[in-house]
Structure formats: C-alpha cells, structure tokens
Amino acid sequence: MDLEEQGSPTRRATEERLRQFEETLAEVRGELRTAIRAQEQLQVQLRSAVEELSEALRQRSLNNGPPVPERPNPQVQRLEARIRGVEQRLDRMGEQLASILESRIWRTLVKGGGFLLRFVR
C-alpha cells in the first residue's frame, strides 16, 4: 500500500468536514443577513414614526399649544404605541444579532474558517 492510498481516506474525511463547515457557515451567514435586514426595516419604521410624531408636535406648537384635552389624542396614542412596538422589536433584533456574534458556534466557525483557509492555500 503506498502513501497516496493511505492519505486518501483522511483527505476525504477532511474534505467532508470542510464541506459541512461551509454549509453551516452559509446557513449562519444567511440568518445573519436576514437579521440585519429585519433590523434595518425596524430602523426605517422607527424613523418614520419619529417623523410623524415630530410633525404632530410641530403642528401642536404652531397652534400655540391648544388646551390639553382630558383624553389623550388618539393619533398620538397610536404613534406612541407604534414607537414602543418598533423599539421593542429593534431591541430584540439587536439582542439576537449580538447573541449570534457572541455565540461559541459563530466564534468556532470563524476560527475554523480561518484555519481551513490557511490549510487550503
């Protein structure tokens, strides 16, 4: 048995592990892209809600601050609820993104990828 035949199973095993690693890395990257897109959408929604609220406050101040009604303005309540909802979703997305980036799996994949890139080159 020559050395090429002995090294072949090891090489196949390494290539299989590399393929599995690449698949896992592609999945994680896809999830990360999805999380980033969702966070960007939430930021756009939050900016929109802030602009609407700012406009409502500006209109109110232009009218010399009409007497404060006993019941809050329904439009302001809706905007406040939207802002709270968007902020909560943004916080959750930020936490999810941070947990992905700080996870042992992610760090292992990054280190393994660096090792494999050095090995392949």
Image (tube, grey):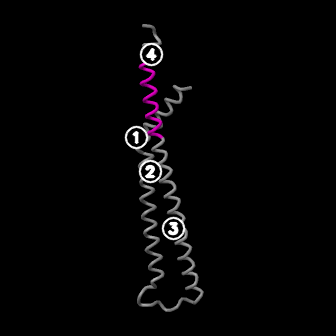
Q: Earlier in the sequence, mark 2 or mark 1?
A: 2
Q: Earlier in the sequence, mark 1 or mark 4?
A: 4
- Please, what is the three-letter code of the amino acid marked with disc 1? Ile
Dot 2 corresponds to which residue? 98
Dot 3 corresponds to which residue? 46
In front of the other: 98 or 119: 119
**Which one is in front in this view, the residue at disc 2 or the one at disc 1?**
1
Verify CB contact (< 8 Å) between mark 1 and mark 3: no
Region rendered in magenta: 8-25
Residue at 57 percent of width and 90 percent of height: 64
Q: Is residue 97 above or below residue 81?
A: above
Dot 4 corresponds to which residue? 7
Q: Is residue 58 above or below residue 63?
A: above
| Cα separation between marks 3 and 2 | 20 Å
| Callout 1 secondary element | helix
Q: Is residue 89 above or below residue 6?
A: below
